[in-house]
Image (cartoon, rainbow, N blue to C red):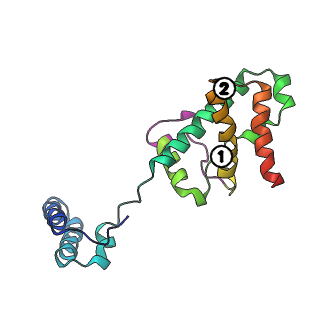
Amino acid sequence: MIPESISLIERQMLINQCKILSLLGDEKDKEKSERSIEILEKGYTGLYPKVFNTLYEEVPISVYEEISNIMKMYSRINESIRLMNDEEKEALNISSLEFEGFDQDSGMYYYMMSYLVDRMDEHPEYKGRELKSHNTSCMLKYNRMLSVYSEFEKMKRETYTAADLQRFIDEVSLISQE
């Protein structure tokens, strides 16, 4: 979030940092730093977005934790499916459980997940896959599935039976009925 007000001490520290940057950078960097210095010196709060334009909103820890839980859930679901025989797989509507990514309405989730996969090398099974969902109800789906997942976590289940997977499928199918 871009601050609406900055204390004098913070402004002075930022001004000093901008002065150092103006000495180290090229001509373009020097101009930008000098403009930032002037904005900060004069306290033009309406122009603070020009000083802080490269900062993003913080991603709340709750978003990271929810993504982490979704990925743990999918890891266990996918491993359980992998361990099933073909007959068990055919009896289930496994495609309804597919990870769909995150849609634009859940932007922080999409960008956090992309960062985790592409930059942090976490969840390598999703590297190179489309992580942007075109389904606006994907978060509703994940939250319904997480309710089942949390029950299984309390029971300390690490792999799921066909009946367990059917519970996930049943939760997902309730979305289309609502």
Residue 10 seen from this side: yes
Residue at coordinates 57% horizontally, 42% vertically from top-left? 128
Q: Amino acid at mark 2?
A: Glu
> How many marks can you see?
2
Q: Determine whether 30 is above or below 98 in the image.
A: below
Q: Report the disc number at residue 10.
A: none
From the top left corner, tell me how far across and down residue 125 is, in percent: 58, 34
Magenta span: 117-133
Residue tagged by mark 1?
Answer: 143
Q: Residues within 10 Å of mark 1 (few under 14, many from 20)?
A: some
Quadrant of res 164: top right
Residue at coordinates 15% horizontally, 65% vertically from top-left? 9
Q: Amino acid at mark 1?
A: Asn
Q: Determine whether 139 is above or below 92 in the image.
A: below
Q: Is residue 20 left or right of residue 85?
A: left
Q: Is residue 53 left or right of residue 17?
A: right
Residue at coordinates 80% horizontally, 33% vertically from top-left? 166
Q: Determine whether 14 is above or below 175 in the image.
A: below
Going from the N terminus, do you reach mark 2 or mark 1 first?
A: 2
From the top left corner, tell me how far across and down residue 7 is, in percent: 20, 68
Q: Indicate the quadrant containing the N terminus: top left, top right, bottom left or bottom right.
A: bottom left
CA separation in Å, label 2 and label 1: 20 Å
Residue 126 seen from this side: no
Secondary structure under the numbered disc 1 in the rendered image: helix
From the top left corner, tell me how far across and down residue 28 is, in percent: 24, 68
Quadrant of res 39: bottom left
Q: Is residue 106 magenta?
A: no
Residue at coordinates 61% horizontally, 43% vertically from top-left? 129
Secondary structure under the numbered disc 2 in the rendered image: helix
From the top left corner, tell me how far across and down residue 151 is, in percent: 66, 33
- 53 and 60: which is toward the camera: 60
Residue tagged by mark 2?
Answer: 79
